[in-house]
Image (spheres, helix red, strand yellow):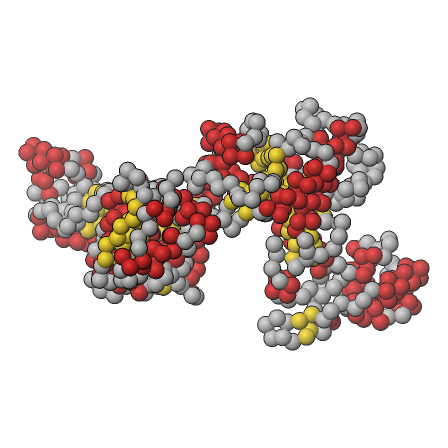
Amino acid sequence: MADPSSYRPKPGEIPDSPGVYRFRDEHRRVIYVGKAKSLRQRLANYFQDLAGLHPRTRSMVTTAASVEWTVVSTEVEALQLEYSWIKEYDPRFNVKYRDDKSYPYLAVTMNEEFPRVQVMRGHKKKGVRYFGPYAHAWAIRDTVDLLLRVFPVRTCSAGVFKNAARTGRPCLLGYIEKCSAPCVDRVSAEEHRELADEFCDFMTGRTNTYIRRLEKQMGEAAEEMEYERAARLRDDIGALKKAMEKNAVVLADATDADLIAVAEDELEAAVQIFHVRGGRVRGQRGWVTDKVEEITTGALVEHALQQLYGEETGDAVPKEVLVPALPDPVEPVQEWLTGRRGSGVSLRIPQRGDKKALMETVQRNAQQALVLHKTKRASDLTTRSRALEEIADALDLDSAPLRIECYDISHLQGDDVVASMVVFEDGLARKSEYRRFQIKGFAGQDDVRSMHEVITRRFRRYLAEKEKTGEWADGATTEDGVTAANGVVTGNGATNENGETAETGEIIGTSLTEDDGRPKKFAYPPQLVVVDGGAPQVAAARRALDDLGIDDIAVCGLAKRLEEVWVPGDDDPVVLPRTSEGLYLLQRVRDEAHRFAITYQRTKRSKRFRSSPLDDVPGLGDTRKQALLKYFGSLKKLRSATIDQICEVPGIGRKTAETIAAALAQAAPAAPAVNTATGEIMEEETGTMGTGGEPVRTGAPDERRGQET
């Protein structure tokens, strides 16, 4: 590991001008390429205290052994040179696209005497017209097969064409009239080129002209009683319309645009591009990239633009490029795109209308691509085994942690404080053993104290299960409050007073084992406890285990901001390599715990907002509550009613009416509903009644109460 100070340039040596810099390792291999508006200011950021650097940046500067730079005149030149060097050196610490394959295009070789329609990949050639790219070659062939009925352009290779010309017999497509057979002089070179021009016009979006022309010809053939010709024209029109349906209009005014969306997490990002030509989606492509450097969404967009248009010129760069975030600064990138196209290019974020709606579709595709990539990666047995081994090595464990439990705390400004426990076995989520907890030991916001309480409760149960033969008291709830999340009640059907729930919803019976012989949920200890947080949360978890006398379970924490792994008693975190499968697994476990906790917290908050004083009246079910609200119109009028008036409601006796009146008198009046759009205080009578009898407040809870954690 190199010391950055050993190769740090003197401040006066670095020019204060735009340029591109390269970090090299001890073997003179380029490991990182970057650009800067000011080389002096940018490079100074790499040579500060290592503790203040992002872990990925820290890894890069300690791997490097030297740095060099090239001065350029403008930021646009810096952008171009950066792209060239990234393509040339393939630096390990730059953003790398995993799927950098060549996407197929529909190409028409207008540079030949007899233009040919074919699928093309790779470098674009001069004089060839390209349409796409398409996600799959078969999509191109399907489109071409439909269009050859109307535009019978040559599709054969040069060898087949020469052989047909030598023998005087066309190929099969010539016999079935899906090729005009210029090889045997059925049409002249000029006529065949005209067919190719019409084919290209149709592909660029000028579809209505040909549809109307064929419809007119079909009508004329029918009037002249040439029914076979009219039927063929009808089939041709159907083929064109079917081809058009494959590329439905999504943007008006024959817009040419590319839409780029990015879905990302701390470690990876998925980039999706929709190519819209003539208002129609003509192609789609995407990449998954490793975020091997600290990078913003705008910078990811900039890298995607370089990848997409670095070797394109002319019409291949559209007039409009829509992105989720703009590079910083945006002017050099926009100027670079304009130079590649040869005319103005608009680079912007869509704000409204059809373009914003289409961008949301592209974003969903990007999100799905990222999820699919992670699912494929997680399902690989070899990868999971390597991840568990890397975790064991990093944390100095005796063996791979086959069972991992992760805990997270969630609340909204200190209210509805809950916690989650998720379980991963052999690197895969085991949702039947998830649990969720209500924090009951204290009120308010204290994540460290909450973590201590949850770990204590969970492992107190573990110790209790080791000492007794039954796990749950018959017909009673436990003091710890564990409930099941899926609503399935097993064993004696006892309800748990502590409110801890499993995602599967089981309430466990009296046996220590399941039907298949496995230990019960809390009787089965993990090899590793992961907490969502840094050193304070880790210390609280370790202290809870020590208080219970448990010393054979490892503890670590994963801090979300820098993806650092904290272990008890260490002042410095463990920084796993960026390519570590172990880090990826820990991140998945932590994110799943966060998802499960925040889902439970939102559920509790929703129930609290919909609660009503009528809920506390014993023996008053939903039917009679609805009858009361329907009779009086609102809870406010019911609160002001006399006992005799309440007795007038069908099904409400005097004793029940007295209980209702007493309950409403003790309950504090609900806060008035507020229209968040106008600020107007709404009368309760006009508010929409919730299921609990209270008016439903407008506006999201987050807007009224703050943010959740």
> Residue, x 72% and y 43% (percent of image)?
500
Foreground residue among 41 and 83: 41
How many callouts does the rendering have? Answer: 0
Q: Position of residue 653 (x, y in %)?
A: 91, 60
Q: Is residue 45 left or right of residue 154?
A: right
Which corner quadrant of the image does residue 635 belong to? bottom right
Q: Is residue 379 left or right of residue 151?
A: right
Q: Which quadrant would the N terminus be assigned to in this image?
A: top left
> Residue, x 83% and y 39% (percent of image)?
476
> Residue, x 93% and y 59% (percent of image)?
655
**Residue 302 at least partly seen:** no
Foreground residue among 146 and 599: 599
Q: Position of residue 598 (x, y in %)?
A: 62, 50
**Residue 157 at least partly seen:** yes
Q: Position of residue 656 (x, y in %)?
A: 90, 59
Q: Position of residue 208 (x, y in %)?
A: 28, 59
Which corner quadrant of the image does residue 96 belong to? top left
Foreground residue among 458 and 45: 45
Q: Is residue 385 above or below residue 444?
A: above
> Residue, x 77% and y 44% (percent of image)?
498
